[in-house]
Image (spheres, helix red, strand yellow):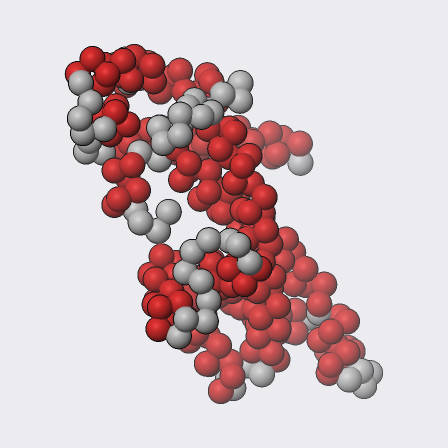
Amino acid sequence: MGKYILKRLGMMVFVVLGISFIIFAFLELTPGDAAEIMAGQNATPEKVAQLREEFGLNKPFFVRYFNYIFGAVQGDFGLSYRSRLPVFVEILEQFPSTLLLATMAMLVATIIGIPIGVISAVKQYSFLDRTSMIFAMLFAAIPSFLLGLVLQLIFAVKLKLLPSMGISHWYSYILPAVTLSTFTLATLIRMTRSTMLEAIRQDYVRTARAKGVAEPNIVMRRLSAQTSAIFWAGLLWLSRFLLCRESVRCWLHPSVLKILPWF
């Protein structure tokens, strides 16, 4: 077991290094000069050169990448191109709202997804089962940024029921929480359904039914433990996704944000 954990941790290091290199290369190949964007349209060449020197943009690609890796290992992620503040400080500033949004999105997905998955498994091949699977596939296929724009258009622009931006009130989190919960909701429905179907076919379930145990008791007491791991897996996945989403947005190149508007 210990060797397996060490092996997985070692693989994780290489995966993180590979992802960081791909992102760094992507930013390098992105059109535009970060120094010119930060300096503004009317900046002098001396000002642009000063910014390149300040942020180390005049150094070769691999030198900048290895400097970034060595700094990241020590907790120094560099300076933000946007605010010129340490990226780590930007991450800490966004952490409370990120954590709250992740929790709300996970609650929405869990409260709706797990019961629907359980009912779909118990009522296999029923109208509810087929309908829930259709919506689960639909939610899994729709990109979050597209769904967010559609919900903004309907509930913020047309109906004027919810704000389209800002976090001044608790209901400001409704649209983003619902948007971010859809993919996890679809995943929880399908995972819960498949897990429940597998558990229903176990011998102890047939024994319980033979002894006359009511079906609701079997579902709630004997099978509920089978789905507990799904919640924690989904929570870790969503939290990691949202933390990455908020953190990356703090230091992404401005031209990247233009072509990736869903960040």
- Corner quadrant of residue 192: bottom right
**At x 58% / y 70%, what residue is drawn?**
112
In this view of the protein, can residue 194 be seen by the observer? Answer: no
**At x 61% / y 34%, what residue is drawn?**
5
Residue 240 x/y as whole percent: 53, 44
Residue 119 x/y as whole percent: 60, 78
Tell which of 90 and 243 is nearer to you.
90
In this view of the protein, can residue 100 be seen by the observer? Answer: yes
Please give left or right for residue 37 compared with residue 195 in the image: left
Residue 96's place in the image compared with 178, above or below, is above
Quadrant (top left, top right, bottom left, bottom right) of the N terminus: top right
Residue 65's place in the image compared with 134, above or below, is above
- Corner quadrant of residue 33: top left
**At x 77% / y 84%, what residue is drawn?**
214
Residue 183's place in the image compared with 210, above or below, is above
Please give the count of numbered marks on the rendered protein: 0
Residue 9's place in the image compared with 51, above or below, is below
